[in-house]
Amino acid sequence: QVQLVESGGGWVQPGGSLRLSCAASARFLSFGVMGWYRQAPGKQRELVADISTRANTNYADSVKDRFTISRENAKNTVYLQMNSLKPEDTAVYYCNAVSRTMTYWGKGTLVTVSS
């Protein structure tokens, strides 16, 4: 049973920073693309950023130049550094990982940006 466990969410004021982490409990499984999605109240889940095993990255336009995704392949871990946070970044952030046969999701971590 593969589990993705997110951490690092919380409350922050506008302009602040948070770092999300996601660790996959899969000792003998490797993932292709790993990424972060988010879902705000009343909205559909959307891609925030993803990263390949070769560190090719893809970002939503709304977070470019503010968020940075990275990963440690040996640890099956992916990170999301979020800077210059805005109230519209408030959402539940979900980790995503794709193996050769399946797509996995974490349970989500809440990020709240408000003054």
Image (cartoon, rainbow, N blue to C red):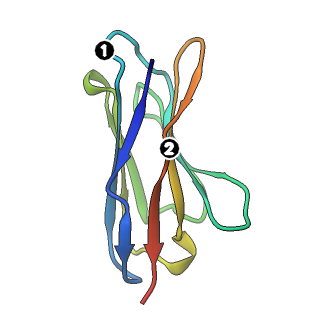
Q: Which quarter of the figure has residue 27?
A: top left
Is residue 7 depicted above or below 57 in this figure? below
The image shows residue 114 at horizontal and vertical percentages of 45, 84
Q: Amino acid at mark 2?
A: Lys
Is residue 42 shown left or right of residue 22?
right
Please report whichever mark, 1 or 2, sits nearer to the chain's N-terminal start. 1
Nearer the observer, disc 1 or disc 2?
2
Q: Residue at x 38, y 39 (%)?
A: 5
Q: Residue at x 60, y 12 (%)?
A: 101
Q: Which quarter of the figure has residue 109?
A: bottom left
Q: Which mark is residue 62?
A: none
Task: Give the residue furthest to the bottom.
Answer: 115
The residue carrying pointer 2 sits among few (fewer than 14), some (14 to 19) or many (20 or more) residues within 10 Å by Cα, namely few
Q: Which residue matches tag 1?
A: 27
Is residue 24 shown left or right of residue 58?
left
Q: Secondary structure at mark 2?
A: loop
